[in-house]
Amino acid sequence: MQIPQPLIDLIASGSHAHLVTMNKDGSTHVTVVWVGVEDGEIVAGHLPRNQKVRNIERDSRVVLSLEADTLSSYGLREYAVVYGTARITEGGAAALLQKLAYVYMGPGVKFPPMENPPPGYITRIRVERVEGVGPWVTRS
C-alpha cells in the first residue's frame, strides 16, 4: 500500500518508532529506532548487525508503533501501528543516520559521532496496513 501522507508527516515530525521483530524462538524483540521515508518505504539505519537486523534477515514480518503529539476527539494520544514486510540492505547506514539525526537531534549535529563509521545496514519496510488512532488510519 502507499504510505498515507498523514503517516509520512508523523514520521517527519521526529516521532520515535518502536520496531517489533521476531526472535528465532518466536518471542518478540522491541527496540526504539529513528525512521524516515524513502521511495515509498519506511527506513531505519543500523551500524552493527544487531539482533533486529538478524531477526529481519530470518523473518521479514515487522510492526512499528509511533506516538503522535496530537489528541483524539476523546482526548487520548493519537498513535500509528504499522504492519509490514522488511528487508535488509547493506551499506548506507551512516548517511541515513546523519540525515535522520537532523530530524531527531537538531541541525548541525554530527551522527554517528565517529570518524569512518562502518557501512552498516538499512531496514526497508514495505507498509501493508496501518492501524491505530489518527488521520493515517483509513477504514472502509
Image: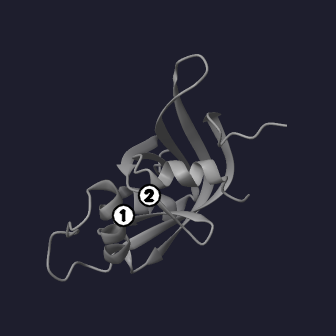
Quadrant assignment for the N terminus? bottom right
The crowding category of the residue bearing disc 2, from other C-alpha atoms within 10 Å (few below 14, some 14 to 19, many at least 20), is many
Whole-percent x, y for residue 15 in the image? 42, 46
Question: Is 89 above or below relative to 75?
Answer: below
Q: Is residue 89 left or right of residue 94?
A: right
Give the residue displayed 14% in from the left and 80% down from the top. 115
Say which residue label 1 marks. Answer: 100
Whole-percent x, y for residue 93 in the image? 36, 73
Q: Earlier in the sequence, mark 2 or mark 1?
A: 2
Q: Quadrant of residue 30?
A: top left
Q: Hey, which residue is sitting farthest right in the picture?
A: 140
Give the residue displayed 53% in from the left and 18% down from the top. 75
- As shown in the figure, which amino acid type bears the numbered disc 2? Val
Label 1: which secondary element: helix
- As shown in the figure, which amino acid type bears the numbered disc 1? Leu
Question: Is 22 above or below relative to 76?
Answer: below
Label 2: which secondary element: loop
Proximity of marks 2 and 1: CB atoms separated by less than 8 Å:
yes
Quadrant assignment for the C terminus? top right
- Identify the mark at residue 35; answer none if there is no mark: 2
Task: Return the residue nearer the eye: 103 or 49.
Answer: 103
Distance from Cα at disc 2 to Cα at disc 1? 7 Å
- Identify the mark at residue 119; answer none if there is no mark: none
Give the residue displayed 47% in from the left and 51% down from the top. 24
Whole-percent x, y for residue 103 in the image? 35, 58
Question: Is 22 above or below relative to 132?
Answer: below
For the image shown, how many numbered marks are present on the structure? 2
Whole-percent x, y for residue 13 in the image? 44, 50
Q: Is residue 104 left or right of residue 77?
A: left
Give the residue displayed 54% in from the left and 52% down from the top. 9
The crowding category of the residue bearing disc 1, from other C-alpha atoms within 10 Å (few below 14, some 14 to 19, many at least 20), is many
Q: Quadrant of residue 138?
A: top right
